Amino acid sequence: MKTQGYLNRITPASLDDVLEKTRNQLVEQNVLQRLWEHDYTLWEDSPEEISNRLGWLDLPETMEAEITEIESLVQDVRKDGITSVLLLGMGGSSLAPDVFSKMFGNSPGYPDLHILDSTDPGAVQHFQDTLKLESTLFIVATKSGGTEETLSFFKYYYNLLVKSSGRENAASHFVAITDPGSKLEKLAQDLNFRKTFLNNPNIGGRYSALSHFGLVPAALIGVDLQEFLQVGRQAMAENSAETSVQDSFAATLGGLIGTAAVHGRDKLTFISDDRAAPFSDWVEQLIAESTGKSGKGILPVIGEQLAADLGTYPDDRIFVIQTAQESGKMAPTAEALSALGHAVIQYHIDSPYKLSHWMLVWEIATAIAGHILQIHPFDQPNVESAKVAARGSVKTYRETGKLPERISAPLTYEAVTGFLQKSKPGDYIAIQAYVNPTPENEKAFRALQTALRDKYSLAVTFGFGPRFLHSTGQLHKGDGGNGIFLQFTSVPTEDLPIPENPGSDHSFIDFGVLKQAQALGDAQALEDANRRMLTFTLMEPAAGTIQAITEKVAG
C-alpha cells in the first residue's frame, strides 16, 4: 500500500483482519477530527495533562510568528563572532537539536552545534577542552526550568566564563529556552542572559521538536525556518481533520504500530542507513515515553545491526526501514522480512527539511497508537520514581559524605549469561550504560547489543545514562515487565565539582557522584517495579572491558 507517496507498508496476512477492524474503528470514532479538535476523551475521561499538552499539533503554523525574533538572535550571534553552540539539556529539550545537528550540519558562516546530555565528568570535560568558550553560545534548555542535569551544566560553564571573562561578559554567552514562570526564566532574568525564549507551555517535552526547543538551535546552524515550517504545514494538511483515515499516512502508521502491539508485536525495530539513522534517537523517546505505561508499551529498538539470518527474529517484531533517499536497496530486506511473517514499514527522508514532516507524522501516529492501546500518551508517571530515589541518594551523600552502597556483580561472561538465562520469549534486554559517552564506548556497547541479540534471539536496546532516563526510562518501569536490565556504571578517572550556585565556587557534589546517584535511583526504581536487573561497575575507559565480554558472548 502507498499513502501520499511516502509510506510503504507490508503486513502479514495474520494482521489483515485486525488492521481492517482498527481502520474501521478509527473512521467510526472520528479519530483524526477529534484529535485536531483537541478532544481529550480520545485517551482519558479527564483532561488532566491532555488539554494542556496538545499545542504541538499547530506548531508549523503558530511558530511562523516567532521566526523574526529567532533570526534576530542568529544575526547578532554571527556578528559577535560566535563559532560554536553548546546546548545543555536532556530528553525532549536535546534530542531534536541533536538530530538537526547531525542531519543538517552547519551552513557556511554559521556556528556548529553540540549537545551535552550526560552527567559523566568526562563528557562535561570534553567540551571544556574542545570548544573555545569565549566564542561559544550556551543554550540552557528545560521546559520545567528545574531539570537538575541541565542546571548543573549551566552552573559549571557559567562559572568558567565568569572566571575568564567576568560576569557581564559571561551572561552574554547564555540563552534560555523554557516555559513561562519557570525557575530558569527568573534565573536568566537575574543573571541578564543574552536572550530568553518562552515556549508555549501547552506542549510536552517530547512533542516540542517544532517549537522554540528545536527551532532556535536549528536556526543557529543555518536552517531556513520558513522552508522548514512550510514542509511541516504540508504534513498538517495531509493529516488534517478532513483527511480520510485511509489517506492519512500518520493514521495508517499509528493504526499499524498500535494494533501490532496489542497483538504481541511490540518491538518496533528501526533499520536505517547512515544518513537517516539520527532520526531514530528522537523517535525512540517519543514512542517509549508516550506508550510505556499502565502495563503496556511499544519498545523502539534502534542501533541493532540487521541479523545475518533474518529467520532468527521472533514474531514479536515489527520493522521500520528508513533511508535518506527513495531507493530499492532495502526492498529485498523488506520483502524477505515480510515473507517471514513480519510487518514492515518503509519510507525515506530525502532531505533534512523533511524532518518537520516526519516529526509531525510520528507525533500524530504515536497519539493514535496511544488511543488504540488505551493509554495516556502525554504523561510520564514513572519517570519521577527514579528522580525521587536519586534525590534520596544525593540527600544521603549530603548528610554523610557517602552514597548508599549497592552490590555490584563481577563483570564476567558467566555472570552475564547466568543472569540472562532468566529470559523468556517476548522479553527484551536493556543495556544501560552510565559511562562516558565516547565513540569508543558506544561502539563497544553496540557490539555487545548485537552479540546478545544473536545469542538469545531477543530484542536488545542500548542507552547512555542518565540520557535514557528522559527517554526509554518511562517504558522500563511502566510496561508489562518483560525487560531484563544490565546496568553498567563507571568510576571516572577524574571528577568535576558542580557549583552550588552560579558564580560561587562552593560545591558539595561532583558530576561523577551525581551520575552514580542517578544510577542508584534508577536501579531502585526498577527493583521497586519488580524488574529483573543486575549492576556491574567498570573503570574508564570502559570499551576494552566490554569488548572482552562481547567476544565471549559472540564466541
Image (tube, rainbow, N blue to C red):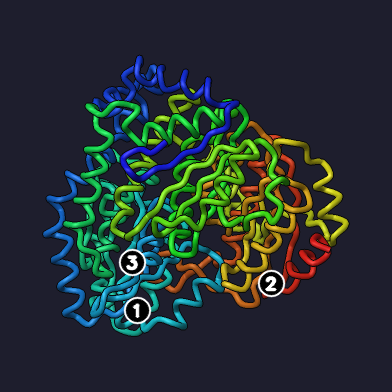
Would residue 90 be visible to someone looking at this image?
A: no
Question: Residue, x 28% and y 60% (percent of image)?
Answer: 176
What kind of residue is marked 3?
Phe
- Give the labeled residue for mark 3: 104
- Give the labeled residue for mark 2: 543
Q: Position of residue 408 (x, y in %)?
A: 78, 57
What kind of residue is marked 1?
Leu
Q: Above or below — where is 471 with respect to 506?
A: above
- In the image, taking residue 15 as reference, residue 151 lies left or right, namely left
Q: Above or below — where is 530 with respect to 372?
A: below
Q: Distance between the residues labelled 1 and 3?
A: 29 Å
Extreme residue toward the top, this view? 28
Q: Above or below — where is 29 with respect to 1?
A: above
Q: Distance between the residues labelled 2 and 3?
A: 29 Å
Single out the mark in the foreground, 1 or 3: 3
Say whether disc 2 or disc 3 marks the residue closer to the N-terminus: 3
Which dot marks residue 520? none
- In the image, taking residue 139 as reference, residue 379 lies left or right, namely right
Single out the mark in the foreground, 2 or 3: 3
Determine whether the residue tagged by mark 3 lies in a helix, strand or loop: helix
Quarter of the view holding residue 75: bottom left
Q: Residues within 10 Å of mark 3 (few under 14, many from 20)?
A: some
Which dot marks residue 161? 1
- In the image, taking residue 207 as reference, residue 293 lies left or right, namely right
Q: How crowded is mark 2: few (under 14 residues within 10 Å), some or many (20 or more)?
A: many
What kind of residue is marked 2?
Ala
